[in-house]
Structures are given as C-alpha cells and as structure tokens.
Amino acid sequence: MFTPQTPITDAQESGLASLANEISSAIAYAPGMQDIRVTVTECAGEFLLEGTIPDKATADRIEAVARAIGGGKVISRLQIANDEACRKTDANGDRRQPG
C-alpha cells in the first residue's frame, strides 16, 4: 500500500471531500446536465469521474467543469452510451448494442 510522504491531515481530507461535492454540484447545475448522472470520488487528492453519458460533447463539457474546479487532478472514466467501442459482435459478426 502506498503511504504518502507527507500525511494528509483531517482538515485537508475534509477539504478534498468538499471539493468533490463542489465538482459534483457544478456538473449537476451546468446547462444541459440536469439528467446526467456522474459520480465524483476523491482519492489521494485526485478526482475520479464515473458514469454513462450520451455523447463525447457531453463528456468534454463535464470534464471541463470538473477541471475548472479540481485543476489537473481530474481522471475521467466516463463511458459514452452509444460508443462504437462498446458495441458487441454476435456469432454472425453482426454488430449489436450491449444489453
């Protein structure tokens, strides 16, 4: 297990959690994001974005909002719902949607 050289204090940890909440709220209240569900988690000073979103443009907007608050410490694991890479191939080689 990784142990930081400089331990994170309770106050710092609380501030990071608060920042994760701020990022989450900013995404939720951004124009056009009312129906988007994204989880923001803080881990070791970095902010992880997870969720399934409709398109790349939405992912870009979410990441921009998160980086405006969290700086370069944002890691995106957002998945695009209709991404070609997520589609499966059946036994006949035909493409089909996951499900």
Image (spheres, rainbow, N blue to C red):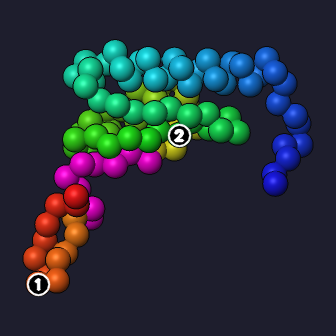
Could you tell whether 4 is left or right of 75 in the image?
right
From which residue to which does the magenta span run?
77-86
Task: Provide the secondary structure element on which disc 1 rests.
Answer: loop
Quarter of the figure with residue 34: top left
Quarter of the figure with residue 59: top left
Could you tell whether 64 is left or right of 89 in the image?
right
Looking at this rendering, what residue extends furthest in the front direction? Answer: 99
Residue 76 visible in this rendered orientation of the protein: yes
Q: Residue at x 38, y 41 (%)?
A: 51
Percent coordinates x, y for residue 23 in the rendering = 49, 23
Q: Is residue 39 above or below residue 88?
A: above
Q: Is residue 97 above or below residue 27?
A: below
Confirm whether the magenta stretch covers residue 66.
Answer: no
The disc labelled 1 sits on which kind of residue?
A: Asn
**Which residue is more in the foreground, 74 or 83?**
83
Q: Residue at x 85, y 47 (%)?
A: 3
Q: Which comes sooner in the sequence, label 1 or label 2?
A: 2
The dot on residue 48 is 2
The disc labelled 2 sits on which kind of residue?
A: Leu
Q: CA gap, disc 1 to disc 2? A: 38 Å
